[in-house]
Image (tube, rainbow, N blue to C red):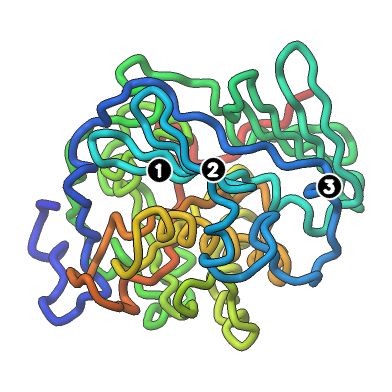
């Protein structure tokens, strides 16, 4: 990532290094069809859960990736290899790229009073009703793609959290955008923030930091998820205070409190702008196979997002999560690496709105 010397980390500070994009992700995918959607949650998996009920990463019982092997199915569709788990799919493109797709709705169970789902005119609307009467409405299209996420207060006023109806014809399959790496001219420790060392004020400032360069258009959520050079236009925070056991996505209870400073930063940012959206990213080291690592990293990201909601009252609708497996290593090793086993938090609001709005839109009348 070219820039001034201030943007280059010292050679002995690997935790600040920009992740190295795996070679396959430097080119567009071979298959240009849209990615298939993840499995929709069964209604039993959308049963409301009390705050503090414990982190449950998806609908699968078991806390290690080995527990999923017997439940995984493999087929070839349109040249892609698709691995289906009860609550996720992993798609491998012939060009070498691989993507995992989960469903955010599992996280909305915590603290809900009721959850109902209706299908009207091909669109599926899932309404999460909170104890105070407010609602979070998620609208999904006939193809399973997210269209809108809206929060409605008890008086009926609405704020659009995510408007995902924009589609740029230049995006391959509607999910991959070929743009050059961003030019980073800010200090290295403000572009990739180390949560273990950064003071709370820096954490908060990063939650509100602008892109490192001008954003030239709006991006869909899938374009942000699956286009590394789009995503890396925003500074990030490596939550290296959380350490997962090998093959597990469970956050140990004694480490949960370490997310307090991250939650405080997000909640402060939401007080300034309730429309903010934050992407929780999961990463693994290179130990193990690619499919396992994608599933594992996605579950770790979801577990961190769930914990932010359960224990620290971060609104679930302002978070989204995505796993990247071993695709973006910071430490170039095929062995075990704590630096590579990380969760990252990134503000993506300017990417969703094209950098045009730093304040929440007026409520709908």
* Image disc number at residue 259: none
Disc 3 and disc 2 in contact, CB within 8 angstroms: no
Identify which residue, 170 or 47, lies in the foreground. Answer: 47
Classify residue 343 as left or right of residue 359. left
Q: Is residue 140 visible?
A: yes
**Residue at 55% across / 81% down in the picture?**
258
- The residue located at (40%, 60%) in the rendering is 293
Can residue 242 be spotted in the picture?
Answer: no
| Among the two numbered marks 2 and 1 on one chain, the one whose residue lies closer to the N terminus | 2
11 left or right, relative to 190: left
Tell me the CA gap for discs 3 and 1: 26 Å
Image quarter of residue 122: top right
Relative to 59, say whether 194 is above or below: below
Numbered mark located on residue 44 in the image:
3
Q: Quadrant of the C terminus?
A: top right
Which residue lies under the disc numbered 2? Answer: 84
Which residue is nearer to you in this view: 138 or 34?
Answer: 34
**What separation in Å lies between label 2 and label 1 (alpha carbons)?**
12 Å
């Amino acid at each position: 990532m070219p820039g001034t010397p201030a943007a280059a980390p010292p050679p002995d500070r690997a935790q600040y290094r920009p992740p190295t994009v795996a070679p396959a992700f430097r080119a567009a995918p071979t298959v240009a069809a849209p990615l298939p959607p993840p499995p929709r949650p069964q209604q039993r998996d959308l049963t409301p859960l009390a705050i503090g009920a414990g982190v449950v990463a998806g609908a699968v019982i078991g806390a290690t990736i080995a527990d999923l092997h017997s439940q995984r199915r493999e087929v070839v569709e349109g040249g892609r290899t698709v691995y289906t788990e009860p609550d996720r799919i992993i798609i491998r493109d012939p060009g070498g790229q691989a993507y995992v797709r989960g469903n955010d709705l599992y996280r909305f169970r915590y603290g809900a009073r009721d959850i109902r789902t209706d299908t009207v005119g091909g669109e599926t609307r899932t309404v999460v009703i909170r104890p105070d009467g407010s609602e979070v409405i998620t609208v999904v299209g006939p193809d399973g793609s997210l269209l809108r996420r809206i929060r409605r207060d008890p008086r009926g006023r609405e704020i659009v959290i995510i408007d995902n109806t924009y589609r740029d014809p230049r995006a391959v399959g509607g999910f991959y955008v070929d743009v050059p790496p961003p030019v980073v001219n800010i200090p290295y420790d403000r572009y990739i923030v180390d949560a273990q060392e950064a003071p709370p004020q820096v954490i908060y400032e990063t939650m509100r930091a602008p892109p490192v360069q001008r954003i030239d258009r709006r991006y869909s959520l899938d374009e942000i998820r699956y286009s590394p050079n789009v995503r890396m236009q925003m500074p990030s925070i490596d939550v290296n205070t959380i350490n997962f056991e090998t093959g597990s996505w469970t956050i140990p209870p004694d480490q949960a409190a370490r997310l307090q400073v991250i939650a405080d930063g997000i909640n402060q940012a939401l007080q300034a702008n309730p429309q903010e959206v934050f992407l929780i990213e999961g990463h693994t080291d290179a130990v193990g196979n690619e499919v396992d690592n994608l599933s594992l990293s996605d579950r770790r990201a979801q577990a961190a997002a769930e914990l932010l909601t359960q224990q620290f009252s971060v609104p679930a609708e302002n978070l989204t999560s995505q796993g990247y497996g071993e695709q973006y290593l910071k430490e170039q090793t095929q062995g075990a690496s704590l630096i590579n086993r990380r969760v990252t938090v990134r503000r993506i609001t300017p990417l969703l709105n094209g950098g045009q709005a730093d304040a929440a839109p007026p409520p709908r009348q």
